[in-house]
Image (cartoon, coloured by chain):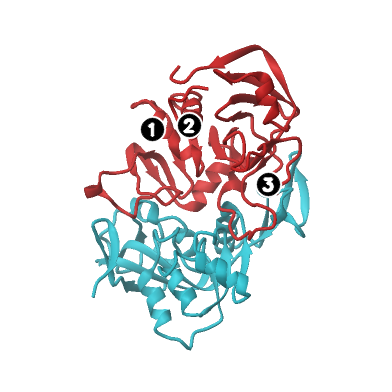
Chain colours: A cyan, B red
Amino acid sequence: MVGGFGLCGTPFTLIDAIIEQPAIRNLTIISNNLGEPGKGLGLLLLSGQIKKAVGSYFTSNRDAVKAWKRGTLEIELYPQGTFVEAIRAGGAGIAAFYVKTGVGTELAKGREERIFNSERNILIEAIRAKAALIKAAKADALGNLIYSKSARNFNPAMATAADVVIAEVDEIVPAGSFDPEQVVTPHNFVDYLVISRYWKEGGVYVKNT
Amino acid sequence: MSKTLDPKKRIASRIAEELKPGMVVNLGVGIPTLIPEFLQQGNGVFLHSENGMLGMGPPPPPEELDMDCISASKHPVTLEPGAAIFSSSDSFGMIRGGHIDVVVLGALQISEKGEIANWAVPGTDILGVGGAMDLVPGAKKIIAAMTHTAKDGSPKLVRELAYPTTGIQCAKLVVTELAVFSINGESMLLEELAEGTTIDELRAVTDARFHVSTALKTWHDGN
């Protein structure tokens, strides 16, 4: 499970760390996109370590489309809101839920349908992962996390829905530095903190070499 | 037809007139992203972006670029005073829970009942759906923004969808560069016709059947 929307809120350093370990293969990546061509998860795709992608929008990475056509990449597609809700449910101890999104479409094929409040709904099972790689702006030493603007996106939900959660952060501050009202992801969801090797230059993340 | 605006901008400018102060509005990709340039400053419309923002503002000047602050189309944006940031999970809860007043979507086809096809073309790769299927059942009102015909000249307003549907819920208003139609779930009503276009000319490029409003208006650019 990997956070981020496109390249926004993506744990670039953690993705690089997987690429540095070519023995790690046949990964199922649960993420909204597979980054962009040659960037973020797009790099991990090019390194041949991804077997399957589960998310909502893979057409923005032409390499993903090519790999799917070649038959080297499996894809499981969800509407974006159903995708994140399945992850939220996975983190909140909910096995499955009914939702009206996608009813009557190709993505509803094979799913159980029930009517609630006169509306058709389909059954979606929760999604969990062995590991979640997420990106936050700041952590305190306990692992409480706060995010930066729209780089929050899928990260807080993913922080709840994996056996091991690794957060890449720009900065670690002493425990107690955050106003408790501002904490978005409480520390008990987070297992490991890694300082990012990337920093923002002119508003764009670049590798700090 | 007036030549003052290109077709996509005409559509965007007409839809901007539908957006009123206090409304919470989600703009889909494509033509809807052109709408903000036709909203008056201080218009009071709250733009929602499904990646987790309410109160999305225009693109920043280059020196204030921040790729942590992007729209659902992944373009850099700013935050208006009073804006709020939230997770994707809260954002789609907002959409499904009926807290968005108007969703403006681009479309590949609209049926005469208002059914929407905007995510996949038969015979091509279907590897992305994004938020379209969430926005369609969630919004209080859906406005479809599309050119009247496809690039090959074929009608996009059709009797029945040939492309896969985005959901069973329907558009209430369709705006093309030639006309404005309201749809009540059963049939389409022509409400406005672009200046210089006749009803016969419109029917020639429209596969869907429609009624003509007794109060049909002529649509001039810039009104």
Q: Is residue A149 visible?
A: yes
- Badge 3 marks a residue whose secondary structure is loop
- The quarter in which the C terminus of chain A is drawn is bottom left
Q: Earlier in the sequence, mark 2 or mark 1?
A: 2
Numbered tag placed on residue B12 in the rendering: 2
For numbered disc 2, what is the local secondary structure? helix
Does residue B40 appear to the left or right of A83 in the view shown?
Answer: left
Query: In the figure, B61 relative to A43: above or below?
Result: above
Residue A160 can be seen, yes or no? no
**Marked residue chain, label 2:** B
Compare residues A48 and B92 and report the one nearer the observer. Answer: A48
Q: Quadrant of residue A93?
A: bottom right
Q: Which residue is mark 3?
A: A100
Amino acid residing under circle 2: Ala
Q: Is residue A47 above or below residue B191?
A: below
Q: Is label 2 in contact with label 1 (beta carbons under 8 Å)?
A: yes
